[in-house]
Image (spheres, helix red, strand yellow):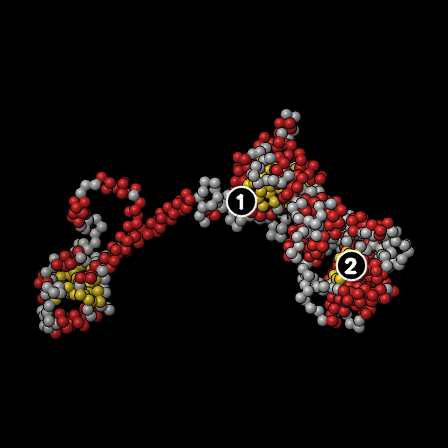
């Protein structure tokens, strides 16, 4: 638009132009050869310093009249103006891109024929070396425009035509070269800044949306709150309903932890005597033994807030996040004090710092260091107790367990029969049972589930209720519990897995072999059930034994267990021409037991009382034993297994009729109970070793009977 004006200043008669392309720096340079003068044009088509149309604004203002609300600050306060930024921008770009819209677009050919050759062209402007605008002597149209491929070609054509028309040099059409930039080139440099400002504004808005309680808010909270601790707070009034009475068994652990409760309740009692209360305790034990529950109960008893966090929640891929979360956790705790912090799975950060195949891990180390610093940092008067749970107390960093930090070590083991009974009583309470919970009933369930942890028991009770519901029963009965227990131990029954008659026969004889060995071996555990219904992942048949709560296992017991495990394969050998793959798992167990006897338990006379076990955590630099010892170990393991095998074969050869009886019965009924076994074979010739079994599972008449001594052992 402005361009036209500038060109207009150049009279056609004034300029005889040799066509020359402008340099970049001097976009509007025309050399007039007629005058030999260089004429410089001011680039006026877009000058940011020059207000293009001041009058327009004035007119607008006049129209509207003076309006106090039109003060700039009022206008800015009214956020609606932001709505007009983008449409305005788009419109101005649109106008800009069509700034040449007034000229009639055509082809160079049309221009040549219709205007140039007829001598109607006043002057020519080449814009950006690609577009040509020509001002005509006519009024309609006054300006025409067309695109050109190359300036050289255009110049040549123009020269040729003017030569042809015989126009003298001094009357030739003046040609000017200009560069016209779009508004984009002025806006572009500001775009990154605008995006940055816009982004910051958006972030700030998102953060403002965050609810005052710290919860909720936009997804950005996740990014901004990365250094925040993820600890869950359980409020003492509402959330922690757990009390010591809900934690069954583990009485010693409760007693130990009771000290923390009294400290949090009556700190004065200790402080006036100058006693320092331990800052923390590590609760260690196998999974599901109630470490979290005990920690919660401690908070529940003391009536203080409980901050629970898992060690793995400190571990992030970003360096420094773990330490920052630890800091945040403790600063929260200080605000809530007196309170209890519980760090579950502390081994995730508290692992011994040099251990691990990759050496030290800087981020974990920083997190652990921060934890140590925080634990040193709080005073007894802060009234914060830190409890930590782990399954691997042995791999914890020594710095964690030194006095002044986690100086109490409370270990919680799997519950024994009495413990299980107590835990059953807790978890049976919410169920609708056939009879009220008796000592006998809970004891029976406890006897049926040796080795179960608290979590297993809770799971088992729930499973029983689910089974009862599936069967549309009104109440949960003992059978439902028995099914649930079997399911937890051996997996789901898979009746859909159909075995061929041949396979079924093999499985029956295999299981009968195990069962007969167990029946006639003195140190075998009491048999509860033999079944040839496939279960779980790969078991085609299985037998359920009830080991008691044993803390010591004799060599003879080991041997008898090995014989029992081999019974399946030996029975196959005795009853069929071929053997099958069914004994793979049995061999694994046998080999493990033999290895343990030889390498760890000093049960080989030849090798003596020495352990050959290596700590796999530490790198092995040299061989721990000589080639001869190695060979000896090999031979001893083989010897132990072979002896067991021979004893097993001898036993089952003698009892081949009994094997037959049991196998046939199994094929007919699929499941044999202890009662079935007694019916087929007579009572077991030994007294059962398992007291719990005797007390809760044997019928009263059997409990009195002393089984005849002297029956055949292996
Ligand atoms: N002594 C117990 N008395 C009652 N219930 C128990 C007991 N021990 C475990 N449970 C049950 O098992 C569940 C799991 O226990 P908890 O989470 O405390 O185990 P944990 O030792 O912390 O396990 P992990 O080591 O896997 O974290 C509890 O919610 C509870 O229902
Ligand atoms: Zn087997």
Single out the residue that lies furthest toward the top: 272
Residue at the spot of label 2: 673
As rendered, which of 655 and 93 lies closer to the eye? 655
Q: Are marks 1 and 2 in contact (CB under 8 Å)?
A: no
Mark found first going from the N terminus, 1 or 2: 1
Residue 495 location, quadrant: bottom right
What's the distance in space between the residues labelled 1 and 2, CA to CA? 51 Å
Q: Is residue 479 above or below residue 349?
A: below
Q: Position of residue 370 (x, y in %)?
A: 56, 41
Specify whether 320 is left or right of 67: right
Which residue is nearer to you in this view: 366 or 100? 100
Q: Is residue 364 left or right of residue 158?
A: right
Determine crowd level at label 1: few under 14, some 14-19, many 20+ residues with C-alpha closer than 10 A: some
Quick check: can you spot residue 436?
Answer: yes
Task: Tell which tag, 1 or 2, sits nearer the viewer.
Answer: 2
Residue furthest right as drawn? 710
- Name the secondary structure under disc 1: loop
* Mark 2 crowd level (few <14, some 14–19, many ≥20, 10 Å Cα): some
Percent position (x, y) of residue 512? Answer: 80, 64
Q: Position of residue 435 (x, y in %)?
A: 71, 48
In the rendered view of the protein, which quadrant contains the N terminus?
bottom left
The residue at which mark 1 appears reads as 230
Residue 16: % across, % down = 12, 64
Residue 27 versus residue 74 in the image, above or below: below
């Amino acid at each position: 638009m402005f361009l036209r004006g500038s060109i207009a200043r150049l009279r056609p008669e004034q300029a005889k132009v040799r066509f020359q392309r402008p340099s970049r720096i001097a976009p509007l340079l025309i050399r007039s050869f007629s005058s030999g003068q260089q004429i410089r044009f001011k680039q006026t088509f877009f000058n940011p310093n020059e207000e293009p149309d001041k009058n327009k604004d004035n007119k607008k203002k006049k129209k509207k009249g003076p309006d106090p609300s039109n003060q700039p600050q009022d206008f800015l306060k009214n956020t609606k103006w932001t709505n007009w930024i983008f449409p305005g921008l788009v419109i101005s770009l649109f106008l800009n891109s069509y700034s040449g819209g007034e000229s009639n677009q055509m082809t160079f050919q049309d221009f040549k024929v219709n205007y140039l050759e007829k001598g109607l062209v006043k002057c020519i402007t080449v814009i950006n070396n690609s577009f040509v605008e020509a001002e005509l002597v006519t009024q309609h149209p006054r300006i025409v425009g067309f695109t050109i491929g190359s300036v050289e070609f255009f110049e040549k054509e123009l020269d040729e035509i003017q030569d042809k028309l015989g126009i003298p040099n001094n009357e030739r059409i003046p040609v000017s070269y200009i560069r016209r930039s779009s508004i984009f080139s002025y806006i572009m440099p500001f775009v990154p800044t605008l995006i940055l400002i816009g982004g910051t504004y958006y972030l700030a808005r998102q953060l403002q949306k965050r609810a005052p309680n710290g919860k909720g808010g936009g997804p950005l909270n996740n990014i901004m709150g990365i250094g925040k601790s993820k600890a869950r707070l359980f409020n003492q009034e509402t959330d922690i309903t757990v009390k010591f009475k809900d934690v069954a068994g583990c009485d010693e652990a409760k007693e130990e932890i009771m000290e923390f409760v009294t400290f949090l309740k009556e700190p004065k009692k200790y402080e006036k005597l100058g006693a320092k209360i331990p800052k923390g305790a590590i609760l260690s034990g196998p999974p599901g033994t109630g470490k979290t529950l005990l920690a919660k109960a401690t908070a529940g008893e003391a009536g203080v807030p409980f901050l629970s966090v898992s060690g793995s929640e400190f571990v992030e891929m970003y360096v420094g996040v773990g330490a920052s979360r630890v800091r945040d956790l403790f600063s929260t705790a200080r605000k809530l004090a007196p309170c209890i912090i519980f760090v579950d799975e502390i081994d995730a950060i508290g692992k011994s710092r040099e251990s691990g195949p990759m050496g030290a891990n800087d981020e974990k180390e920083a997190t652990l260091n921060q934890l140590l610093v925080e634990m040193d940092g709080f005073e007894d008067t802060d009234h914060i107790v830190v409890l930590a749970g782990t399954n691997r107390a042995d791999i914890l960093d020594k710095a964690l367990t030194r006095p002044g930090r986690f100086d109490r070590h409370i270990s919680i083991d799997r519950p024994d029969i009495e413990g299980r009974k107590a835990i059953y009583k807790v978890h049976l309470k919410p169920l609708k049972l056939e009879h009220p919970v008796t000592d006998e009933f809970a004891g029976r369930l406890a006897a049926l589930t040796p080795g179960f942890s608290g979590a297993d028991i809770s799971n088992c009770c729930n499973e029983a209720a689910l089974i009862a519901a599936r069967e549309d029963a009104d109440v949960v009965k003992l059978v439902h519990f028995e099914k649930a227990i079997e399911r937890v131990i051996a997996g789901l029954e898979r009746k859909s897995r159909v075995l061929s008659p041949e396979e079924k026969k093999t499985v029956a004889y295999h299981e009968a072999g195990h069962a007969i060995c167990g029946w006639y071996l003195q140190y075998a555990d009491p048999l509860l059930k033999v079944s040839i219904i496939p279960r779980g992942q790969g078991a085609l048949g299985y037998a359920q034994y009830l080991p008691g709560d044993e803390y010591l296992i004799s060599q003879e017991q080991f041997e008898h267990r090995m014989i029992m495990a081999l019974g399946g394969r030996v029975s196959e050998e005795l009853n069929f021409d071929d053997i099958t793959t069914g004994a793979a798992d049995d061999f694994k167990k046998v080999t493990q037991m033999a290895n343990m006897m030889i390498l760890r338990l000093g049960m080989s006379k030849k090798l003596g009382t020495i352990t050959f076990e290596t700590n796999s955590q530490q790198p092995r630099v040299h061989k721990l034993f000589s080639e001869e010892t190695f060979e000896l170990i090999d031979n001893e393991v083989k010897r132990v297994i072979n002896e067991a095998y021979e004893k097993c074969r001898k036993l089952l050869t003698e009892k081949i009729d009994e094997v037959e009886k049991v196998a046939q019965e199994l094929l007919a009924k699929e499941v044999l109970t202890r009662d079935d076994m007694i019916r087929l074979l007579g009572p077991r010739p030994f007294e059962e070793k398992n007291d719990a079994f005797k007390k809760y599972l044997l019928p009263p008449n059997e409990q009195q009977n002393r089984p005849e001594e002297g029956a055949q052992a292996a």
